[in-house]
Image (cartoon, rainbow, N blue to C red):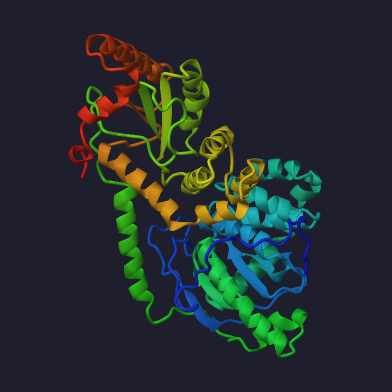
Amino acid sequence: MDDTTTPRPPHRRSARPARLVAALTLALASAGCPTGGASESKQAPAIHIDAQRYNVPLSDDDYAKGGAAPLVTIVIFSDYACPPCARTWQVLDHLLEDYGDDLRVVFRSYTVPGFGRGEQAAEAAFAAGAQGKFWEMHARLFEHGGDFDRPLLRAAAEAVGLDVPRFLDDLDTGTQTARRVRDRRAATALGVNGLPAVFVNGLYLAGFVDEPTMHGILDEEIKRARVMLDDGVPRAELYATMMRNAASKRVSEPESAQALRDELAKAQAADKAVREPKTLIAPKGDARYRIEPGAAGLRGNAQAPVVVVAFVDFQCPFCRRAWKEELAGLLARHPDDVALSVRQLPLPIHESAEGAARAALAAGKQGKFWEFHDRLLAHEGALGRTNFVGWARELGLDEAAFLAALDDPATARIVEQDTRLANKVGVDGTPGFFVNGRYVGGYTPGVLSGVVDEELARAAELARSEGTPPSGRFAKDMDAAIPESEFPNP
């Protein structure tokens, strides 16, 4: 078995509470990719942990990350064209950092014929592995996602430093087809019918399972492994010993799978009502709405007469452009007169947007929201927890406290509350700005600056005519603005 991997930081455990769902019997998660057709299914499968252990043997030529003699071995069947598989690998990479040599993760390919050319991608990863670059290609393929045509695969091979003619020859001659087919047959023999499919010391997890839940499962498995060590089982033989006592049969659903499907469907319907309302009545451009600063507070003078409240998705390219091209300059030109507050509106089309929103708020718990905000909006490309932790370290944050805040349900509730507020007032995309309550939707260069200039001129005029000091302008506008109870959407 190939146990090589890149160097890891010292063993680290996140300061988050471990959560084990129903004593390793069942856990809900988001839908996985199908394995029976050429396109993603909209039907969510039951996500569960089967308490039965299944015999999932290892091979000497497996690609594996982590410890050579771990307490927990994870075998994952995945497809590079499957978005939930990519999310699962992000979680697994974080777990490898957290558990160090106590964890090993073994890659297995399970491709869906015709689905996003995942078969070509799998053979490309194995061809890179033949040149000692499996994990480099693995990471690049998940980063790209989508349709893996030949130009993309060639570019990936060049990027990771392969002998490209040899790589292309391997693809053309099908030298890795047998290995891909072997993995698929192993999955079929186990009865796997959805992706990703994860086996934790033989325990079957169907679909994506979030990181806190995985921590709970691994912590329980480590306890069991330590009991076996105390009973005299050599550490290097733990997994083989578990497999000798595991079932040699196909995976099956628990009796309560249908109840879980029903519960998951209800949860998804409720989430869709929050994040994807069927229709939104947009806010009127000539009205003022009571949209005040959120949990992140203000950037700029707290007594500024003009306050811009921006609903932002940190993966939205228009949010990035608005900040770089206009909003940052506005604040620099008007340091005393214009302040900014950001509220969260992560869109479902951006996989890492909600995590980024929570990470920014977690940094805000240590007074570094705006520094984290700037890094998020300066970043382009793939985004994940590795980025978040790296920036937290750069900013001198207490890493354990940052991770605890990142996974705290209270942080997720702030994001949900901001999203609900955006839906109620009618913001249907990002960025969405409220300038002293006046709505500016999207980013068109110059439009936001024009509205800010109008509000500055109005504040100066009202200070002369009404005697309202500039420092009280925003509060007075909010007192007179349309309240949330009268927003156009329920």
Query: 418 or 121: which is nearer to us?
Result: 418
One can see residue 45 in this view: yes
Quarter of the figure that contains the N terminus: bottom right
Residue 309, above or below 238: above
Where is residue 251 shown, x and y percent of the image? 51, 79
Q: Which quarter of the picture shows residue 239?
A: bottom right
Query: 434 or 190: which is nearer to us?
Result: 434
Q: Residue furthest left?
A: 486
Taking the image as shown, residue 453 lies to the left or right of residue 61, namely left
Residue at image location 47% in from the left, 23% down from the top: 327
Where is residue 387 shown, x and y percent of the image? 61, 45
Quarter of the figure that contains the C terminus: top left
Query: 446 or 457: which is nearer to us?
Result: 457
Residue 350, above or below 214: above
Query: 310 or 306: which is nearer to us?
Result: 306
Where is residue 430 shown, x and y percent of the image? 40, 34
Taking the image as shown, residue 94 lies to the left or right of residue 26, namely right
Residue 339, above or below 90: above
One can see residue 148 in this view: no
Number of numbered tags placed on the structure image: 0
Taking the image as shown, residue 447 lies to the left or right of residue 77, namely left
Taking the image as shown, residue 302 lies to the left or right of residue 11, namely left
Where is residue 97 shown, x and y percent of the image? 67, 59
Residue at image location 72% in from the left, 51% down from the top: 136
